[in-house]
Image (cartoon, coloured by chain):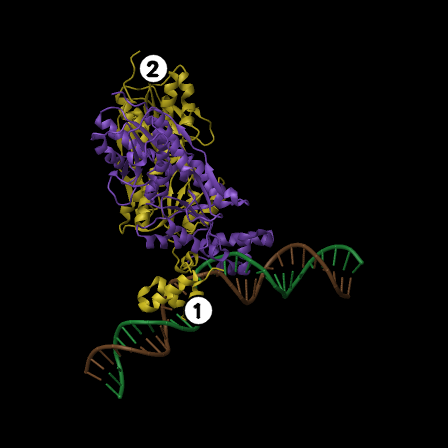
Chain colours: A purple, B yellow, C brown, D green
DNA sequence: TCGGCGTTCTGAATCGATTCAGTATCTGTA
DNA sequence: TACAGATACTGAATCGATTCAGAACGCCGA
């Protein structure tokens, strides 16, 4: 049996409360007694108050949960997510708080249970679509939470750190428009759930369920609408998953087809890099490509992309959770983005 | 006040035990009653059993701690550590276990307390030197743990997943020896604690405190000893931190000096990339460079390096913790490594 | 000498569940 | 009819601490 606080109390001949105080409130007892207690604890091999029991009584855990809506291991595959997590970790570290990475099973009820049974004081939710099941569960537990995007069902007290997805995407598209491109394709991750990689027809951009993807696609469309290229004229491509291979597969057919676009705008750098992979494989006339996020690989590949501050996003999000500002308005943060023009976007080739 | 299990029991008019069973052991009560209870819980907004209380009573938390000896945010800076973590996360996910990333303060007593007060069922310790304070604390708590290296004070029951650092490093050095290099420098991260980046003299490799660095340096030295180049003839460089800039700073002087080495062997890819940075900046005759780990950037940079399986290391380590093998011998895993020869290592330039 | 105050320590209630030995009710069988 | 054996549910003990209202004591000033 592991020794308990009671055992130490008995050994020293004091009450349980006093031993507790020796650990948690040293000012409540004489230094001499405190020393005697700690010494006895050492003798007995008592490792200090049990974290779980302490949490129960205190009502505080000292950890915040990080919720990735997709597979936990995915979080480590996307460089952007990793840098985001680095930001969260840095802030948590400074605050002396642990990070609980919660694995979510595929089924919604299971995932809900996972959220319900996480021992945490709050949640950082990395938004990736419709995670209302998660937010409902968190709200039911009455725990504070923050998200990486303003949500449709958000109240004014709900805090987030995000970017203006639509405006940011628009800058990339405007750049491509400025280069003269009119026959273009837009590429998103899982534009509609369940569809395989490839082309897709959608009456309107509002039909895209995933809010981030929707915002970015809408931003792309905005810039083209301005020069008279309407939504239906834009080829819409969907990759089954945010991976290079899925992206390459998604664009393969359209690159080989008769109406080959002169530019492809992707909703993430990972996708854009996949497009570059595909392009490198096929030959053919040059095709402009843009990405989103500005991960490290983007610079190396010369990818034109929209930069958003990854670590900062994570850091400020965690800070918002860990010490909430007085002013509720300060709980709504939109980070700046920046178009980074590199070599992957050139003018329309003359034929 | 948040409703408790008792409140639900009162609402339905059953005992607390029955409500508990409704959640944890559905076979212990009739389906009808269970439905009624869950419905009442829904009405009351009861989010299910409190995780902390449940952990206390059950004596199980459902989370394992991951201990990085350095800053938590560091873990996200080194690509190797990230991939390792991805492996751990994958295994944990499959097992339905959460991951607790524990931030460690700089001071040893504080760090010890952090380990003592982490609510976990066990620890994955990413070894990075002498973390006996951590292991002592873990042992005192009587928690299972696994490490990424066999440790000096390890008993036969202590489990680990590692590589043969010395033999692996030796293959890299042997390759460099084979290319004819004899005037070489070895570069490690913080070879001695507290020394600034730059050259360093050490009577013997056994004086290096950090076990991983020691093992690799020893392996390098082995290969050179075989062709008659003894330890004191090898230039020893230390970088203050595992970063490209620190590495570049560490090699600057020796690259500019009179006895410029024809090859530099680094203890990690990150350091090796820093050396390449420095080399790109200076010009001068070519200099062979080797790394260690084989991170993604290594391939792009054409870096000759020793590959060790990062995700697999994390995965198998976590598996060792999460379902321990019967056979204690199975708890000692040495993963294979492989020398990957790329363009960064060429023959000695003829002068 | 006594009231008042500060320091040091104690006792009992409490956090929110799980567990297990039982009790009560029902089913089937000889 | 009676008894064994399931099935459904309850009560009380328990997990390991924290907290707070007080008790005991010494000290000071009036």
Dot 1: chain letter: B
Nearer to us in this view, A173 or B234: A173
Dot 2: chain letter: B
The picture places residue B181, in percent across and down from the top left corner, at 30, 19
Lower position in the chain sequence, tag 1 or tag 2:
1
| Quadrant occupied by the C terminus of chain B | top left
Nearer to us in this view, A169 or D28: A169
Query: What mark, if any, has residue B10 been given in the picture?
Result: 1
Q: Tell me, yes or no, if residue B250 can be seen here.
A: yes
Residue at mark 1 to residue at mark 2: CA–CA distance: 83 Å
Query: What mark, if any, has residue B127 been given in the picture?
Result: none
The picture places residue A271, in percent across and down from the top left corner, at 30, 34
Location of mark 2 (residue): B285
The picture places residue A336, in percent across and down from the top left corner, at 45, 34
The kind of secondary structure element at disc 1 is helix
- Residue at the spot x=31%, y=25% of the render? B301
């Amino acid at each position: 049996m592991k020794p308990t606080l009671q055992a130490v109390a008995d050994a020293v001949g004091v009450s349980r409360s006093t031993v507790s105080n020796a650990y948690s409130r040293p000012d409540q007892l004489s230094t001499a007694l405190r020393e005697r207690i700690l010494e006895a604890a050492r003798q007995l091999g008592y490792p200090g108050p049990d974290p779980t029991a302490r949490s129960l009584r205190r009502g505080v855990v000292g950890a915040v949960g990080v919720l990735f809506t997709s597979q936990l291991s995915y979080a480590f595959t996307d460089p952007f997510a990793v840098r985001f997590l680095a930001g969260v970790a840095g802030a948590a570290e400074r605050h002396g708080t642990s990070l609980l990475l919660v694995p979510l099973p595929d089924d919604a009820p299971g995932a809900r249970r996972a959220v319900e049974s996480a021992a945490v004081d709050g949640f950082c939710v990395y938004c990736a679509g419709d995670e209302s099941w998660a937010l409902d569960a968190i709200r039911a537990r009455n725990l504070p939470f923050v998200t990486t995007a303003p949500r449709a069902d958000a109240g004014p007290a709900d805090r987030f750190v995000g970017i203006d997805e639509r405006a940011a995407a628009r800058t990339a598209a405007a750049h491509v428009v400025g280069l003269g491109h009119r026959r273009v394709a837009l590429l998103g991750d899982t534009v509609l759930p369940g569809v395989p990689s490839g082309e897709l027809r959608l009456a309107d951009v509002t039909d895209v369920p995933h809010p981030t993807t929707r915002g970015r696609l809408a931003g792309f469309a905005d810039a083209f609408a301005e020069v008279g290229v309407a939504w239906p004229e834009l080829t819409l491509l969907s990759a089954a998953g945010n991976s290079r291979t899925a992206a390459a597969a998604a664009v393969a057919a359209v690159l080989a087809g008769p109406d080959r676009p002169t530019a492809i705008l992707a909703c993430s750098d990972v996708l854009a890099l996949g497009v570059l992979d595909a392009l490198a494989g096929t030959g053919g006339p040059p095709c402009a490509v843009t990405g989103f996020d500005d991960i490290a690989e983007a610079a190396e590949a010369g990818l034109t992309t929209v930069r958003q501050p990854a670590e900062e996003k994570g850091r400020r999000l965690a800070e918002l959770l860990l010490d909430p500002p007085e002013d509720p308005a300060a709980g709504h943060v939109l980070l700046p983005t920046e178009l980074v023009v590199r070599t992957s976007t050139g003018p329309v080739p003359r034929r």
